Amino acid sequence: MSRTPRSKQTEIEAVIQRALAGDQSGYADIYAQYAASLYRLCYSLLLNEQDAEDILQESFLYAFKNLHRYDAAKASLKTWLYTIAVSRCRNTYRRKRFVTVDISQWFGFEIKSAAAEAPEAAAIRRDAKESIAKALLELTPRLREAIVLRYGQGMTYREISEVMGCPQKTAESRVRLGHQRLRKSLQPVGLGLLEELLRVH
Amino acid sequence: MFRFKYRYCKVLMARYVSGDLPLAARRRVARYIDECEDCYREYMRHREFTQELERNLPTLGRPASAQLNQVWERLQDDLQAPAQERAWLRGYGASGSLHFSYSLVLAAIALALLVPLMLGYQAAMFTADLPRVPQYAAIVSTPNTSLAASPLNISTAAIGGEPLSPMLHNTPAPRL
């Protein structure tokens, strides 16, 4: 049975109230619900496992300590957590400026593939992801954020504008510009890979 | 005309593909895609690439559950540790151990600068040369009786057991 957004929101508010009342399971529930997607967001922006783990930890630490400040009327808990994580990612790439990136770390952990997937298909999928990761690194941080939030996290333009702290129109143009640049840098390999993927499947 | 249609489509294509356009703009883009070959090609390219992104980006950096568990354990340690630290530091009114250590270092530097200054000042006090009182003037102004009543006998005058006469050898005799 699928839950409506309204009932989901009520459920989240109940979990927050439990956490604020001192119930540790409330914190655990919030972590269990958002940790994976928040980690993916951090990793897609930083493309470094260790940094992504650190930012995840810092973001939840800040969120749990300041949970009493969270206002459900202003933003959803997801948007609030994403805003915290994105601002910490910005600090990190301001510090590092992506001088060097260890490409071998990108696929340090295996993504569980379907048992029926052929090794060739898995290799092509891996190549496609590697190309996209490389192309993401070539984007400016703001465009990368917009692309990752839109296509990696499936957020609406309104949510993107809230997380990035910009008007909705700016978020839209950043997604469009990021899309264009990614397509331009992936054009030589992107279409070929796509065709191969279609042939293998 | 076709250039205009193509540019219009290119700007709005991302929102058209994701279904975020208002109805009027959506209808217009759909009409252009039907009429203009370039617009149609742009639409197909955009749709394919968007699908590729939507397929690959969500799988980028998918964490293992062991990884998330480790972070959760570290998070719990962090949540408990600062509470103890804060209780210990509450008396100092500091917001964290970093501020406290900074103030300690500053106090040590201030002490290191002030102590030698104070010691040096005291040593200077002990070894300072006091201005000497001019001895001749002292002798001349010492008699409390009139000069006429007891004329000064320079030849017998002495300071600290030494006769004054050699010291006053080149001094003209006082007029009496």
Image (tube, coloured by chain):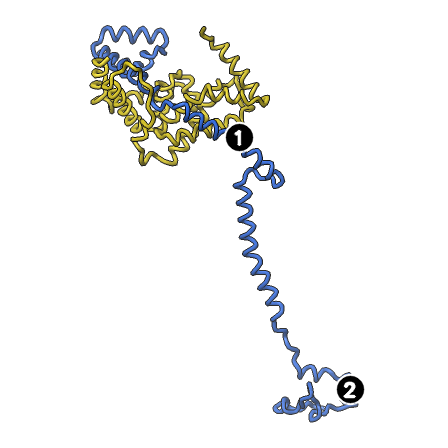
Chain colours: A yellow, B blue
Q: Disc 2 residue type? A: Ser
Q: Which mark is residue A164?
A: none
**Is residue B5 in sight in this rendering?**
no
> In which quadrant of the rendered image does the N terminus of chain A lie?
top left
Q: CA distance from mark 2 to mark 1?
A: 95 Å
Residue at 53% in and 30% down:
B79
In screen coordinates, is B77 left or right of A99? right
Residue picked out by circle 2: B146
Q: Disc 1 residue type? A: Leu
Residue at 72% in and 82% down:
B141
Residue picked out by circle 1: B79
The vertical placement of B137 against A184, above or below, is below
Disc 1 crowd rating (10 Å Cα; few below 14, some 14-19, many 20+) is some
Q: Quadrant of residue A67?
A: top right
In screen coordinates, is B91 left or right of A29? right
Q: Chain of mark 2?
A: B
Q: Quadrant of residue A121?
A: top left
**Residue B1 placement (x, y as % from top left):** 22, 11
The vertical placement of B26 against A118, above or below, is above
Which SS class for mark 2?
loop
**Residue A100 placement (x, y as % from top left):** 31, 35
Which SS class for mark 1?
helix
